[in-house]
């Protein structure tokens, strides 16, 4: 399946009028590389196994040149598409359709447009072996909640299957804090004023409840939920599970994101 994804990406590049050759690197070490080769290196590196020593036999070139091509492609794609991945405004005209669709499926709200959740992506210790001048300290990426080092992401999945993503954030920060850094609450307030209707997200109990964020109900200390509240939680958990599946599908498809196989020291080069 990944081969056909690469082929589709190259066909899209040709149809979109992208330049056939791109300049990579600074003037002293500049390389001219075919556009389809750049994306082939980038997508192949994201799969597994993805060691440079193995990729040299498949793609040709030295380890240094392949690494330079991959890093350039990563920065280029991030700079071009990151604003779109974080911009919920591009979907605002479909919010009424999203809300109607989820309501027809049995959701407890008639203004629900997306499911929101955080994801902790584990990594090796930032100092590692041989890192003389580490840019991150151990305590910055260590999460006591997950008992591991890593980075936090926030994501929202829409009823049409598209998703929005914010991050990365340091692993030590909680979901409730990184949620505020996304500024999605401000975006939803502006959209509500523009469309004259309030639309909300749905998340678990770790997030603050508001007009723009509905959450799984949690009993007060020493108390318990009523029967109606428990039924509400069971109903909405069936909807919320889709965003958990989103994270697992991404890490399953792109093995380079899996800690056990590709991000431990000694597993990657």
Image: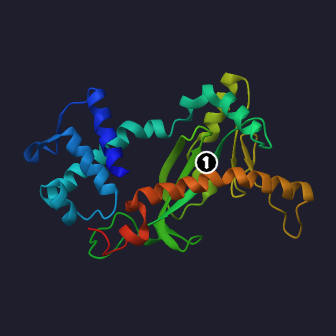
Residue 125 seen from this side: no
- Residue at point 75% right, 51% down? 236
Badge 1 crowding class, 10 Å Cα cut-off, few under 14, some 14 to 19, many 20 or more, is few
Residue 82 in which image quadrant = top left
Residue at left offset 12%, top offset 55% = 61
The reply, left or right, for residue 93 in relation to residue 37 is right
Give whichever of 165, 10 is nearer the camera: 10
For the C terminus, give its image quadrant: bottom left
17 shown above or below 125: above
Q: Is residue 15 visible?
A: yes
Which residue is most to the left?
Answer: 28
Secondary structure found at label 1: helix
Q: Position of residue 242 (x, y in %)?
A: 62, 51
Q: Is residue 11 left or right of residue 258?
A: left
Side (left or right) of 18 relative to 212:
left
Here the colouring is rainbow
Residue found at x 53% / y 56%: 247
- According to the picture, the residue beneath numbered tag 1 turns out to be 180
In the foreground, 155 or 27:
155
Would you place residue 196 above or below residue 71 in this image?
Answer: above
Q: How many marks?
A: 1
Task: Please state the horizontal and vertical placement of residue 244, each as a whole percent of the image.
Answer: 60, 56
* Left-right relation of 227 to 119: right
**Which residue is at 73% across, 57% downward?**
205
Give residue 206's position: percent from left, percent from top.
69, 58
């Amino acid at each position: 399946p990944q081969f056909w994804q690469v082929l589709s990406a190259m066909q899209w590049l040709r149809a979109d009028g992208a330049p056939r050759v791109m300049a990579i690197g600074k003037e002293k070490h500049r390389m001219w590389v075919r556009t389809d080769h750049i994306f082939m290196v980038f997508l192949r590196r994201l799969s597994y196994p993805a060691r440079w020593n193995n990729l040299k036999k498949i793609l040709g070139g030295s380890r240094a040149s392949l690494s330079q091509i991959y890093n350039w492609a990563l920065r280029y794609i991030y700079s071009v598409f990151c604003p779109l991945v974080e911009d919920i405004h591009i979907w605002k005209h479909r919010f009424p359709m999203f809300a109607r669709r989820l309501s027809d499926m049995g959701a407890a709200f008639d203004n629900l447009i997306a499911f929101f959740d955080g994801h902790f992506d584990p990594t090796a210790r930032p100092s590692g072996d041989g890192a003389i001048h580490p840019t991150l300290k151990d305590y910055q990426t260590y999460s006591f909640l997950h008992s591991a080092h890593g980075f936090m992401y926030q994501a929202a999945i829409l009823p049409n299957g598209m998703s929005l993503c914010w991050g990365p954030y340091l692993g030590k920060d909680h979901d409730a804090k990184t949620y505020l850094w996304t500024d999605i609450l401000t975006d939803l307030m502006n959209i509500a004023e523009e469309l004259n209707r309030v639309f909300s997200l749905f998340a678990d109990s770790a997030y603050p409840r508001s007009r723009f964020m509905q959450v799984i109900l949690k009993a007060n200390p020493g108390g318990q939920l009523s029967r109606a509240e428990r039924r509400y939680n069971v109903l909405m958990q069936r909807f919320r599970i889709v965003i958990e599946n989103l994270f697992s599908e991404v890490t399953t498809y792109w093995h380079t994101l899996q800690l056990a196989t590709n991000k431990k020291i000694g597993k990657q080069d």
